[in-house]
Image (cartoon, rainbow, N blue to C red):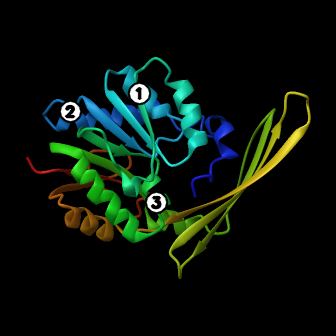
Amino acid sequence: MRDAYTVLARCYDRLTADVGYEKWADYVERHFRKLKRPVRSVVELGCGTGSLTKLLAQRGYQMTAVDLSPDMLAVADQKCEGLGVLFLCQDMSRLALLEPADAVISCLDSVNYVTRPAAVKWTFQRVYKALTPGGLFLFDVKTPLALEGADGQTYLDEDDDLFCVWRGEYSPKRRVCGYGLDLFVREENGSWSRGGEYHEEYAFTMDELDSFLREAGFRNIRQHGDKTMSAPKEGAQRVFFAARKDL
């Protein structure tokens, strides 16, 4: 689905203006400090338009940003101009770096968008190989409860020049939540253009992801609540995994 974000790329930042990337960057750095070893080189998988990549680069990290969408990467490249970020257009399950990294992160449920369990296993194996000894792999996922709750929901986002409608539909058999998006964008000449996209997220259980990590070689694995350093509570909608490669 290399072209899945062709339409969305030009509007993505406006639709995610309320994400609060500064808080995400702060949380990532809390894990870096807990590592008690220098973190200089960081890889972000599923970087999108590079908002988090930019913040971390501005904070002094040597960033490599990976995404499957050329259109999203084009926006990210412009956003991070002059910050020395290396951009790679890759499927995360085929991750190949020029040199090992101190940390690999994947935020905003990017792992859920890898809808084949085998591909997630490959991703974790690639990440393990890409890390320096003692390196950190930090990622978050939406829980099955969160994805099941999106079934039948309709969401609206709009401003003066943009109107977006998206609907969620969960398939228990496939364990997939599909999102159909309709985008209406006002062009410079005042006319409106319409575009549509479809995206899917897979409902991985936390036990499955833990086992995939262990299979890849990770041993020091912790689960955390949404941007907290404590264990996730019952009914959590988002869970973070922090896994380390052995020294």
Crowding at dot 3, Cα within 10 Å, few <14 / some 14-19 / many 20+, comes out as: many
Q: At 39% from the left edge and 58% from the top edge, which residue is drawn?
A: 93
In front: label 3 or label 1: 1
Element carrying mark 1: loop
Q: Position of residue 66 (x, y in %)?
A: 43, 42
Tell me which corner region of the image, top left, top right, bottom left or bottom right, holds residue 18. top right
Q: At 63% from the left edge and 48% from the top edge, which residue is drawn?
A: 5
Q: Is residue 173 shown above or below 196?
A: below
Q: Is residue 211 shown above or below 159?
A: below
User: Residue placed farthest to the left in the image?
Assistant: 247
Q: Nearer the viewer, residue 221 or 118?
A: 118
Q: At 38% from the left edge and 55% from the top edge, which residue is drawn?
A: 94
Indicate which disc, 2 or 3, sits on the residue closer to the N terminus. 2
User: Residue placed farthest to the top in the image?
Assistant: 82
Q: Amino acid at mark 1?
A: Val
What is the CA distance from the residue labelled 1 to the residue labelled 2?
A: 22 Å
- Determine which of the numbered discs, if any, sits on residue 33 in the image: 2
Q: Position of residue 1 (x, y in %)?
A: 58, 58
Q: Position of residue 104 (x, y in %)?
A: 30, 43
Q: Nearer the viewer, residue 161 or 60?
A: 60
The residue tagged 3 is 112
What is the CA distance from the residue labelled 2 to the residue labelled 3?
A: 26 Å
The residue tagged 1 is 85
User: Can residue 132 be seen by looking at this rendering?
Assistant: yes
Crowding at dot 2, Cα within 10 Å, few <14 / some 14-19 / many 20+, comes out as: few
Element carrying mark 3: helix
Indicate which disc, 3 or 1, sits on the residue closer to the N terminus. 1
